[in-house]
Amino acid sequence: MARADGNQRPPSLAGASWLTAASTRAVLDAIAQGGFQARVVGGAVRDALLGVPVKDIDVATTAVPQDVIRLAAAAGLGAVPTGLTHGTVTVISDHRPFEVTTLRRDIETFGRQVRVTFTTDWSEDAARRDFTLNALYCDADGTVHDPVGGYPDLVARRVRFIGDAEARIREDYLRILRFFRFTAAYGAGPPDADGLAASIALAAGLDQLSAERVRAELLRLLAAPRVVEIAAVMAEAGLIERLIGARGDIATLRRLVDIERALGRDGDPLLRLAALAGGSRHLTALGARLRLSNAESERLARLVLPDPAFDPATDESEARAFLYRFGVEAFRDGVLLAWARGDAAADHSRWRDRFLLPARWTVPELPVRGADLVARGLAQGPAIGRIVRAFEDWWIAEDFPQDEVRLARALSDLVKANRN
Ligand code: ATP
Ligand code: MG
């Protein structure tokens, strides 16, 4: 665990379970077998030094991709050439993907397109990375290498560009978003002044990015713990408007995050996006603008119209009817956003109660089907569908009665009414 104890050399990660895992060893050993060096780099080393769980493992190596492929095969590992022009091979070990990338120097960078030359110099590879805390490397034996002084920044929770911030952003404007994303996830205090000034000065470059890249970084930024603070800085600088076309409703975002925390829920990036976007006009435009999936766009579209069922001031039967018709996700989304848009506190018991309705009430199944009507002697045809729908409306309006006699009577009445 990193502590600001004056020791600015990174500690060893020897013995870390993700490093000693057979799957990781197999990848590092396979490359070492060929006489090349291989080190874990980036997020895994950063997170391990912070004592947070390690997710994906990226590896940097002096071996060129052809050698990586050959050595992986020789060790019985899978190898997929996922980004050969960038020097990346995905090695599959024990069903887990490891991105193995040859050390490289970036000659020319135009966003995603980059002309690279491979190198065996670790500091050159470090210099092409984005932030100092993302350029820490770890040997198979746990020794951590820190070519650009990332460890002191990590300990101080400073997210700092490697080299000149403006120059680094001009190479790839996505780094503006990554700067805010990593600051929201790992930083403390206000964003690094140089990084912030450069991001604001070069903000117009965000327009050149593909919707997919923006979407991925933006959703990760929205999931980060310090999103409210950082989004407020971005909104103030006009960056939120540039990204989503809305100025940024920080007050609603803040309340949503507080409510999520009070409920003990993980932050939901899409819902946070809806809160940040504010009014309905912006919500409907977001799907296309960020090229969201159909499911995501539909989820946002549903949030355009608030429903009385979300408000705990209405009778709970309203909420049950909504749950029956539109499902648990739409209900939870709707309540959370309506709650955040109002002024009730994050621990307001009636809002909390309304939100928790799906946990104490299971959506019942409609107790009548078309087949039941056929069994009563009705001929197949459109009348059957009409009667079932009318019955359903009655059943919802009556708050889902279960009494068999009452149900049978209601159904008979509807059948009679349809005969006339
Ligand atoms: P996460 O935990 O979010 O995956 P990460 O640091 O692993 O964090 P990735 O996006 O997986 O982030 O990238 C892996 C590494 O590649 C980074 O740590 C960084 O060194 C480098 N990198 C990724 N994207 C860029 C970029 N756009 N510009 C420069 N370096 C980058
Ligand atoms: Mg990663």
Image: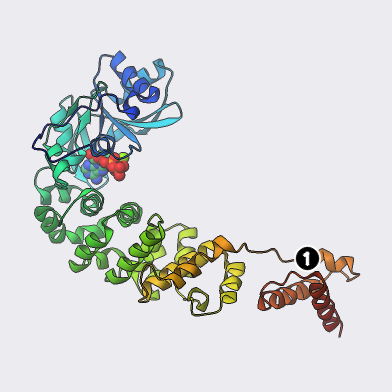
The residue most toward the front is: 349
Ligand 1's quadrant: top left
- Give the side of residue 7 with respect to residue 23, left or right: left
- Please tell me which residue lies in front, 404 or 63: 404
Q: Is residue 4 above or below residue 377?
A: above
Q: Which residue is tagged 1?
A: 369
Question: x and y percent of residue 54 in the render?
Answer: 33, 37
Question: x and y percent of residue 369 in the render?
Answer: 78, 65
The residue most toward the bottom is: 420
- Give the side of residue 335 with respect to residue 320, left or right: left
Q: Is residue 187 above or below residue 134?
A: below
Q: Is residue 199 above or below residue 98?
A: below
- Give the side of residue 416 with respect to residue 53, left or right: right
Residue at the spot 10% in from the left edge and 34% down from the top edge: 7
Question: x and y percent of residue 127 in the render?
Answer: 14, 37
Q: Quadrant of the C terminus?
A: bottom right
Give the residue type at disc 1: Arg
In terms of secondary structure, where does tag 1 sit?
Answer: loop
Question: x and y percent of residue 83 in the render?
Answer: 33, 35
Residue 289 visible in the current orientation? no
Is the residue marked by circle 1 packed among few (<14), some (14-19), or many (20+) residues within 10 Å? Answer: some
- Please tell me which residue lies in front, 33 or 361: 361
Residue at the spot 31% in from the left edge and 21% down from the top edge: 28
Residue at the spot 37% in from the left edge and 25% down from the top edge: 21
